[in-house]
Amino acid sequence: MVKFETDVRIARAPEDVFRYVTAVERIPEWQSQAGVKRVDRSSPEPLRPGSEFTMRRESGRGTATIECEVTAVDAPKRFDFHSIDSDGFVGDFATTLTRNGDGTTGLHWAVDMRPPNLLYRVLSPMIRREIRKSALVDFENLKRILESGPPTRPGTNADVV
């Protein structure tokens, strides 16, 4: 098992951050270090538990297809999904947002990856380092994108950035 957690403080309201991170088609905009190139939703309806989307991720070994299913959506506090990729990696991803007293958002991200076989289990420390390296860059990208965009008023549906 490969587990990793990280926290980032974003100078935007939780509603703005939630709206952006749940616009799964936009994941490639901020997860470039992780190699996410494309995300397709299976339906245009708002995300809810059971909603599905597919990510395409480039790595040194080629393109991986990652099938994802939303497991929790609680606006503007939580967005979780379960994944399985074309190599058999199973993952659970949890994003939790909290409103800080100064109007910023605390984002907590946790991943639990389960390698498909003994070889990948042996390589788990290296995989964890790669997840950490990617997450540190990607969540700084997310922070930069959100903090550089125009603010939105709470309760509006204005697009973020």
Image (cartoon, rainbow, N blue to C red):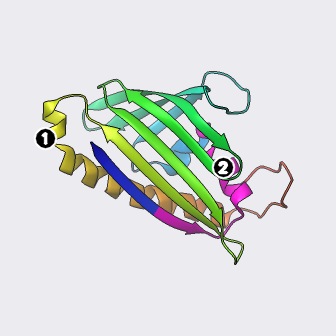
Cα distance in 3D space between marks 2 and 1 = 36 Å
| Nearest to the observer: residue 141 or residue 115 | 115
| Nearest to the observer: residue 148 or residue 128 | 128
Q: Return the residue at label 1.
A: 122
Q: What amino acid is at disc 1?
A: Val
Mark 1, secondary structure of its residue:
helix
Image location (x, y in percent) of residue 60: 25, 38
What's the magenta region? 7-24
Residue 16 against residue 25 in the figure, above or below: below
Q: Residue furthest bottom?
A: 102
Image location (x, y in percent) of residue 136: 40, 61
The label nearer to you, 2 versus 1, is: 1
Whether 55 is among the magenta residues is: no
Instruction: Tell me which label, 2 or 1, sits earlier in the chain.
Output: 2
Image location (x, y in percent) of residue 67: 46, 25
Mark 2, secondary structure of its residue:
helix
Q: Residues within 10 Å of mark 2 (few under 14, many from 20)?
A: some
Q: Quadrant of residue 10?
A: bottom right
Whether 17 is among the magenta residues is: yes
Disc 2, disc 1: CB below 8 Å?
no
| Nearest to the observer: residue 154 or residue 158 | 154
Q: Return the residue at label 2.
A: 20
Q: What amino acid is at disc 2?
A: Tyr
Check the picture and name the quadrant holding the C terminus: bottom right
Q: Residue shown at 40%/42% (left/top)?
A: 35
Q: Residue shown at 55%/43% (left/top)?
A: 27
| Nearest to the observer: residue 138 or residue 128 | 128
Residue 73 against residue 159 in the figure, above or below: above
